[in-house]
Image (tube, rainbow, N blue to C red):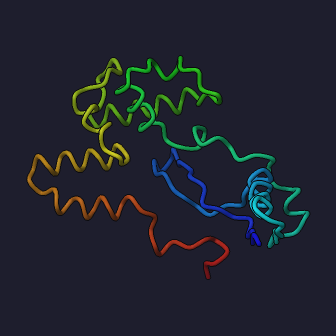
């Protein structure tokens, strides 16, 4: 059996608040069909969707590509560290908006990861080695320099996860 509630946590970046979030949203038709396909792979199965057919038909056919809904600072940083060329010229399957690329470079410049010509700095190379958001990585590198890494690790760990008190809109009272 596959029980499909029709929702998932989908990564979204808010340019206004400059925060990457994982809100619970309705899934696309393609995601729902993929879930249904899981129940018949090994043996006969049943998919139970916990929403109406009309709701399914009203959903978008596909989920927006992740590159169009996330902040690009980490992507740009990795591309720069790997010498993959300018993001504006990279052959993405779904090219991001030039404003997204500019926002990513702006953040990396504020962090000291790139210079004014958008070339990666030594600090950027160090940040690219860390498996966290560049802002959190910058906190860790600064903490290491100030001999307070242990304390900042706790803060970064808390910032790296979604607020456990946050609940889906439907569950709020």
Q: Image check: 72 left or right of 97?
A: left
The quadrant where residue 148 appears: bottom left
Q: Image check: 60 left or right of 160?
A: right
In the orientation shown, which residue stands out farthest toward the right? 54
Percent position of residue 131, x then y: 35, 46
Residue 96 drawn above or below residue 135 = above
The quadrant where residue 121 appears: top left
Q: Residue at x 80, y 73 (%)?
A: 50
Percent position of residue 20, x then y: 48, 51
- Choose between 64 and 130: the one closer to the eye: 130
Q: Residue at x 82, y 68 (%)?
A: 45
- Choose between 84 and 118: the one closer to the eye: 84
In the orientation shown, which residue stands out farthest toward the front? 42
Quarter in which the N terminus is drawn: bottom right
Q: Image check: 1 left or right of 114?
A: right
How many dots with numbers?
0
Percent position of residue 141, x then y: 20, 45
Q: Residue at x 16, y 61 (%)?
A: 150
Quarter in which the C terminus is drawn: bottom right
Residue 47 drawn above or below residue 144 = below
Residue 4 drawn above or below residue 27 = below
Percent position of residue 80, x then y: 38, 25
The quadrant where residue 48 appears: bottom right
Q: Residue at x 83, y 70 (%)?
A: 46
């Amino acid at each position: 059996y596959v029980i499909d509630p029709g929702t998932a946590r989908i990564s979204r970046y808010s340019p206004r608040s400059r925060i990457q979030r994982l809100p619970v949203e309705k899934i696309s038709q393609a995601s729902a069909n993929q879930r249904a396909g899981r129940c018949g792979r090994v043996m006969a199965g049943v998919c139970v969707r916990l929403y109406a057919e009309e709701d399914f038909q009203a959903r978008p056919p596909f989920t927006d590509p992740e590159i169009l809904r996330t902040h690009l600072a980490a992507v740009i940083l990795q591309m720069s560290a790997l010498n993959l060329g300018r993001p504006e010229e990279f052959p993405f399957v779904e090219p991001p908006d030039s404003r997204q690329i500019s926002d990513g470079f702006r953040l990396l410049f504020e962090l000291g990861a790139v210079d004014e010509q958008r070339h990666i700095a030594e600090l950027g190379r160090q940040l690219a080695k860390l498996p966290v958001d560049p802002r959190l990585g910058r906190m860790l590198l600064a903490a290491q320099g100030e001999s307070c890494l242990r304390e900042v690790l706790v803060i970064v760990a808390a910032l790296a996860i979604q607020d456990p008190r946050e609940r889906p809109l439907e569950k709020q009272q």
